[in-house]
Image (spheres, helix red, strand yellow):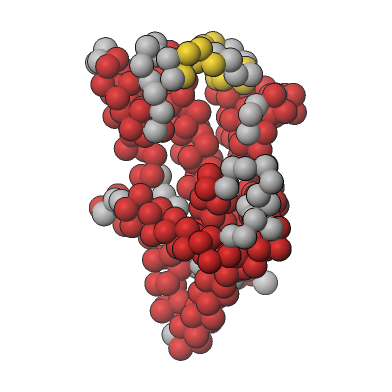
Amino acid sequence: MSLFSLIAVFLIEQFKPLDYRRIVAEPLGAWAGFVESRFNAGGRHHGIAGWLVAVALPVVLLGLLYLALHTLNPLLGWVLNVGVLYLTMGFRQFSHHYTEIQLALRLGDLDRARLLLAEWQDRSTQGMSAREVARLSIEGALGASHRHVFAVLLWFILLPGPCGALLYRLALIVRDRWTADSPAEHNEFPAFARRVFGIIDWLPLRTTAAAFAVVGDFEDAVHCWRTQPAMWPDRDLGIVLASGAGALGVQLGGSVVDEGEVSDRADLGLGDPADVDFMQSAVGLVWRATVLWMLLLFLLGLASLAG
């Protein structure tokens, strides 16, 4: 059923792309903000209680709904699976921006490529070169493929029904919203949300990195995965970026113009500097990793039927 749900979501997404920010990110962000406004008194125990209400409660309620529908008719449970997956994962969350940037760079329209990147990643791109735009685009695509496809899919497989998909999406949004709203060091309210999401994302990060290694340059991907993430600002996401860069044979990270100033970042990957040609290679890497996941789901389905 997981494989058929995934195929259905990919097909629906091609015909009816989802406005993720308006339909998913903003409402769930508002929900996280509402819970925070009711529970945030600065203490760690307040954060635990708030997380249970903001994340655990909706996941449990969704699980009960799935159980009721599946008991009534398995087809209804499958429809719920497809609906939740459609809302919580998908390539269109980043592929549209990425494709437009790639096209602009191929046409030599650097100004448009900068504008598109700024809209996508909500950052200043003034003064960036074509290589810097390509590099940040590849980094964004690799990270987004993990956040919006592979991590959601893994949790969808691990938990019954659509519970895992909602768990990952809500936990990520709650962590980001509460961390942004409570930056002060003395405020421990978001600490539990950060810690729990780190636990939730531990296995998906490594399965995504492993998938990139298997479908790309395995030796370089594993080498970069083992040696480079510790130097990246977001060490966890650095696992995916380092493995992806090594699998592609491209150099990511490094210095980049940020808010009009040069920002030094650690180097990721091996090989040639990123350019528009590597953007197409990154698309191929992500799709090969997706096919690998679908093949594994197919084999798991066969094993379940045989059992």
Q: Quadrant of residue 279?
A: top left
Total of numbered circles in the picture? 0
Q: Is residue 234 or residue 31 the one in the foreground?
A: 31
Q: Residue 199, position in %: x, y? A: 70, 52
Residue depicted at 26% across the width and 54% down the height: 16
Q: Quadrant of residue 200?
A: bottom right
Q: Quadrant of the C terminus?
A: bottom right
Residue found at the far right of this picture: 226
The answer to whether one can see residue 259 in this image is yes
Q: Quadrant of residue 84?
A: bottom left
Compared across the picture, whether 267 is left or right of 111 comes to right
The answer to whether one can see residue 3 in this image is no
Q: Is residue 198 or residue 105 the one in the foreground?
A: 198
Q: Residue 228, position in %: x, y? A: 70, 24
Residue depicted at 59% across the width and 42% down the height: 183
Compared across the picture, whether 269 is left or right of 130 comes to right
Q: Residue 252, position in %: x, y? A: 55, 19
Q: Residue 247, position in %: x, y? A: 59, 26
Compared across the picture, whether 307 is left or right of 62 comes to right
Residue depicted at 56% across the width and 20% down the height: 253
Q: Is residue 225 above or below residue 202?
A: above
Residue depicted at 47% across the width and 32% down the height: 140
